[in-house]
Image: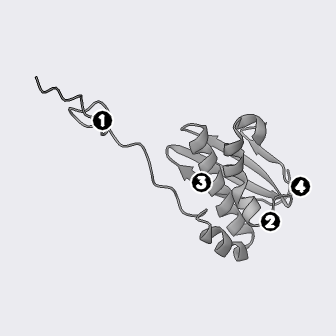
Amino acid sequence: MSARYYEAVGRRKTSSARVRVYPGTGNIVVNDKPAEQYFGRGTDILILTRPLRVTDTSNSYNISVQVAGGGLSGQAGAVSQGIARALCLVDETLRGVLKSNGLLTRDARAKERKHYGLKRARKAPQYTKR
């Protein structure tokens, strides 16, 4: 892969993905494995490829990803944001389409901390009258 590439970072929950976009035929490699092999579920593949489908560039670029932290669904979201940001660097005219589909905004939702006296973040112990 000696061609010029565009690099961007995507984040979701506790996952962080470094994405490189090369001119190519549409191959996606995640942590040195094909994306279909790394992400077992079809929904994760759909999340991952959404920026490419929205911009009709599925077969125009090869994508190399290094992702760490969190679970597989968080990693898929991080890769999706990284791809969207990298596509903005490749072609600035794609920014409007990506932004209107919400692919450039970081999803800030994360797990809420456990609170004192509760079983989880919001689950209270069962109330007993007697």
Spatial separation of the CA atoms under disc 3 and disc 4: 22 Å
Residue type (three-letter) at the residue carrying disc 4? Thr
* Cα–Cα span, label 4 and label 2: 13 Å
Secondary structure under the numbered disc 2 in the rendered image: loop
Helix, strand or loop under label 3: strand
In the picture, the quarter occupied by the C terminus is top left
| Pointer 1 residue | 123
Give the numbered dot on residue 61.
none
Mark before the other along the chain sequence, 2 or 3:
3
Mark whose residue sits in front, 2 or 3: 2
- Tell me the quarter of the picture where residue 60 sits: bottom right
Which residue was labeled with disc 3? 10
Instruction: Count neighbours of disc 4 (C-alpha within 10 A) and say few if under 14, some if 14 to 19, many if 20 or more.
Output: few
Separation (CA) of disc 1 from disc 3: 32 Å
- Dot placed on the residue nearer the N-terminal end, 1 or 3: 3
The reply to whether the C-beta atoms of the residues labelled 1 and 2 are less than 8 Å apart is: no
Q: Residue 25 carries which label?
A: 4
In the rendered structure, are the residues bearing label 3 and label 4 in contact, judged by CB atoms less than 8 Å apart?
no
Could you say where residue 18 lies in the image, as x and y percent from the top left? 65, 50
* Amino acid type of the residue that numbered disc 2 sits on in the rendered structure: Asp
Crowd around label 1: few <14 · some 14–19 · many ≥20 (10 Å): few
The image position of residue 23, as x and y in percent, is 85, 60
Give the Cα distance between marks 2 and 3: 20 Å
Q: Which of marks 1 and 4 is in front?
A: 1
Please name whichever residue, 77 or 20, is drawn nearer the observer in this view of the structure. Answer: 77
Q: In this view, does 79 lie above or below 89?
A: above
Name the residue type under label 1: Lys
Q: Mark 4, mark 2: which one is toward the viewer?
A: 2
